[in-house]
Amino acid sequence: VLPEKRTLKLLKSHNINVNWYMYCPESAVILLSTTVLENVLQPFYFRAGTMSKLPKFEIELPAAPKSTKLSLSERDIAMATIYGQLYVLFLRHHSRTSNSTGAEVVLYHLPREGACKKMHILKLNRTGKFALNVVDNLVVVHHQDTETSVIFDIKLRGEFDGAVTFHHPVLPARSIQPYQIPMAGPAAVTSQSPIPCKLYSSSWIVFQPDIIISASQGYLWNLQVKLEPIVKLLPDKGRLMDFLLQRKECKMVILSVCSQMLSESDRATLPVIATVFDKLNHEYKKYLDAEQSYTMAAEAGQSRSNPLLRRPVRTQAVLDQSDVYTHVLSAFVEKKEMPHKFVIAVLMEYIRSLNQFQIAVQHYLHELVIKTLVQHNLFYMLHQFLQYHVLSDSKPLACLLLSLESFYPPAHQLSLDMLKRLSTANDEIVEVLLSKHQVLAALRFIRGIGGHDNISARKFLDAAKQTEDNMLFYTIFRFFEQRNQRLRGSPNFTPGEHCEEHVAFFKQVFGDQALMRPTPF
């Protein structure tokens, strides 16, 4: 179409006998039915002003009695994008296998390149009139006779026979939620109560992916899937998680499932809880890896040379540590009725899962464990967790341990050991030791790492004076005099060191002569 000239230009033409056609605007693919039985389908793909002929394929028709001749009906075919792939859905009313009388939906994968391939079969286990929709990557099959619908998820594990995967409904058959139609008319009349909509009506017309039109009542609807009720309908928590993690609006529902499985009334076993955490962290890790790969490629300048490079989209299935901590674990540890051993086991299970997927554990999760252990006086367990590095070293964790010294004296040493292992926390170690009046220990530590030539003399002299131990003050003062002698050739402090007050105190206690008699440290 050339809008400026108001003309059309013929680009390409194909001569083909067509019984009926179907078009999928989402993927720009047209499907043409050919041959007498109407079951050989010829797809064409439109892109940027070109038309590409894809390989044709045959839909297997069910076996029919010799007296009748079956043909493929347009109403039994649908095209839809499921999990980013284009599928042709065929509603086969009589199964090809003799031992099965129920209808089934056969899914043919239609790739951009290569031949179309039969991939999935959805077992309906019933006969009658059906209609198909696709909502949130789920195949929804409506059954008019029973006025119910069933849901299929091809991502969930099915039965693979070496060629195709057979799937059964995710949930028991359920009806579409009743809908009330408001009465039309003047304002005075609208006070009348609304009338219920006739569901699964013979006048319904279904369009892909999620549209239902009621021709008799003049309504058009979009079909949606409500996730909250599914939680009660799917008791297997592992399968429930597999299902929920593929849905668009899943985050708050998944968090509520996690809270629910940790509640007193509906408490799950630890293996089940571990399975749920692993499924969450599998998605979390996939996103982190994709984000890291993108960042590295962008830093290497590949984003300019590769226009297809895109930052990964963070879906609602990515639940990070702050989500689980804020919405699930922080409330869970406050529950007084929960046995503390179970609480600690759950916290450690989540940390174990993060470690298994090589995700760095945030310090606030370790703090939650420590606070819970302290609350129940489980210091021996805390000691073991730290000793065997179950809880990862971090500065915030070391500071938390320091604050526990009044309850548990060994926490002080555990904290120092952790800070030493971090090797980037030397300043913090010195500050901790000085705050505990362990001035000599702080000086020995700073000498041990070779930083004693750059430390502030005043800071150490202040700390020594606060101890009110004159001999300790003498020792520290002498150390810095010797340092001054070695570095500058004179034991005196420079004005910039602001040590006049300490020099005066030294003279007052030990006399002027003591200034000139340095002794070995």
Image (spheres, rainbow, N blue to C red):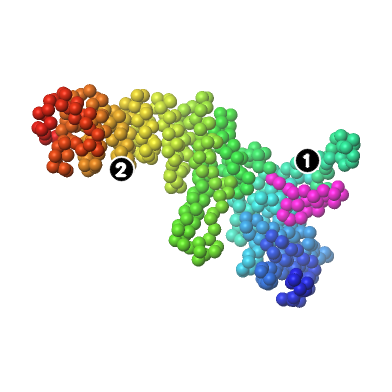
The dot on residue 423 is 2
Q: Which quarter of the figure is the C terminus placed in?
A: top left
Residue 54 position (above or below residue 126): below
Q: Quadrant of residue 103?
A: bottom right
Q: Identity of the amino acid at label 1?
A: Pro
Which range is magenta?
A: 203-225
Identify the residue at image location x=55%, y=63%. 308
Residue 13 at what x, y percent from top left? Answer: 74, 76
- Residues under labels 1 and 2: Cα distance? 65 Å
- Residue 66 visible within the image: no
Is 211 contained in the magenta span? yes
Residue 36 position (above or below residue 400): below
Q: Secondary structure at mark 2?
A: loop
342, 441: nearer the viewer? 441
Q: Identity of the amino acid at label 2?
A: Ser
Q: Secondary structure at mark 1?
A: loop
Q: Is residue 300 left or right of residue 410?
A: right
Identify the residue at image location x=50%, y=45%. 281
Residue at the disc numbered 1: 178
Residue 192 at what x, y percent from top left? Answer: 87, 35
Residue 339 at what x, y percent from top left? Answer: 49, 27
Residue 318 at what x, y percent from top left? Answer: 54, 46
| Of callouts 1 and 2, the N-terminal one | 1
Q: Is residue 429 left or right of residue 452?
A: right
The dot on residue 186 is none
